[in-house]
Each structure stands twice: as structure tokens, then as C-alpha cells.
Image: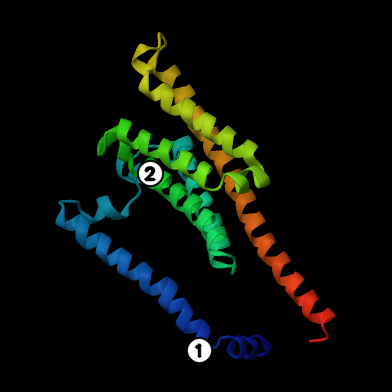
Amino acid sequence: MYYLKSLKKNTTQKIIIGCLLFSLLPASIFFVASLAFLLGNGFTLMEILRDPAQQSGQSSFLGFLSNIGVWLWVSSTAICFFSLFNSKSSIRGKEMVFLVGTFSSILAVDDFFMIHDRYVDQKLCYLAYALTAGALLVRHFRKIIAVDSFSFILAGTLLALSIGTDLIQSRIPLPYSIVQVFEEGFKFVGGAVWLYFCSQISIDHLTSVKSRVCHQIDTLDHQGL
């Protein structure tokens, strides 16, 4: 009885509306829209709903490292946007977290749907990524240096090695499978380092905001307000 009373007391109308508007409704719309779109493009319900491993009868570990790699990009995105939506910092401070999170989400979509392998010329994708990373470094150079320039540069170097290996793989005198080990290995470890960089940026963002608020409170206390 105590738990029911506590649940009723703490489940306010604001909480219910927030959950419905920001989780249930968007998820339902996305689910129905995806079904309609894919059915209209010739896919069957089972092809849309069931996992590829179930449909093919293959092991659940098929593409294991590739799938975990996507998790790294998605985690980077989630961390950045959690930091963004849970702070009240300056526009410039939010800008960097937003750009890093958006860049991470683009990499996640590309990796998951194999955009640069099947739909867009890979050289254009790689050029766009290089320019975006370069612009991010130039735009927020001081912040990156102050927080963790090493992980930013290391992640960029590893991802560049992955891209470089992909572009010249036909010229490397090694079996394709061995070349893939290096290409995917650079990308996987680079994604892990990028996740670490995103966590450092997000922690700094939240900590800076918290410190600024505490400083304002201390100032008011000293003024007797």
C-alpha cells in the first residue's frame, strides 16, 4: 500500500505528459512511419521487423565488431546531447557540444547503413568528414586544447589511418581479409578514443556550468542576498 501511495504521489501530470510527448509519441510515429515507408518500397513485415541474423539463420555474433563500433558512435552522440540538454551555458559552449554530437550521429548513421559504401561516393564522404573535423578544431581550438587535445588528435589520426587503408587497399600486397583487420581495427579503436573525447568534453561542459552557478550563489551569499 505504501508503494502504491508513493507511486501515485510522485506520478504527476507533468511527468506523464513529458513521457508521452517525448518518448511514446515520437517512438510510435517513427515505428509506424518506418513500417509504411519500407512496406511501400517492397520489404515484407518480417524483413523489416526481424533481426538479419534471425532471417538468415546465421549466428547472432555475425558482424559483432562492426555492430559494437556503431554503439561507440551512438554512445558519443548520446553523451554529447545529454550534456547539451542538461546545462545552461553560453551559446559558444553549447555550440561545440552540439557540433561534436551531431558529427558523431552522422558517423553512426554512415557506419550503420553503410552510406559511403553504397549510396554516396566514399571520397566525398571522407573529404566532408576531414573538413568537418578540421573546422571543429579551428573553431574551438582553445577549448579542445584546454580539455583534451591528445584524444582529439589520436582519434583523428586513427580514423584517418582507417580511411587511408580503405582508399589504397587494392594496392596493398596483402590478402583482403588482413587489410580489413587493419582498416576496421583503426576505425574501431578510433571510435573508442572519440567516445572518450566526447565524454571529456561533456564532463567539462557540465562541470563548467556547475562551477559558474556555484560561483554566482557564493557571490550572492557574500552580498547578503
The quadrant in which residue 174 appears is: top left
x then y, percent, for residue 43:
19, 51
Q: Is there any visible trace of residue 62 in the rendered image?
A: no
Q: How is the image coloured?
A: rainbow
Q: Which residue is mark 1?
A: 13
Residue at 35% in and 45% down:
54
| Residue nearest the viewer, comparing 115 with 95 | 95
The N terminus, quarter of image: bottom right
Q: Is residue 75 above or below residue 36?
A: above
In this rendering, position of residue 24 left or right of residue 191: left
In this rendering, position of residue 72 left or right of residue 9: left
x then y, percent, for residue 85:
53, 66
x then y, percent, for residue 151:
62, 38
Using the image, tell me which numbered label, if any, was put on residue 210. Answer: none
Q: Residues within 10 Å of mark 2 (few under 14, many from 20)?
A: some
Type of amino acid under label 1: Gln
Residue at 31% in and 69% down:
29
Q: Is residue 183 above or below residue 47?
A: above
Residue at 43% in and 42% down:
132
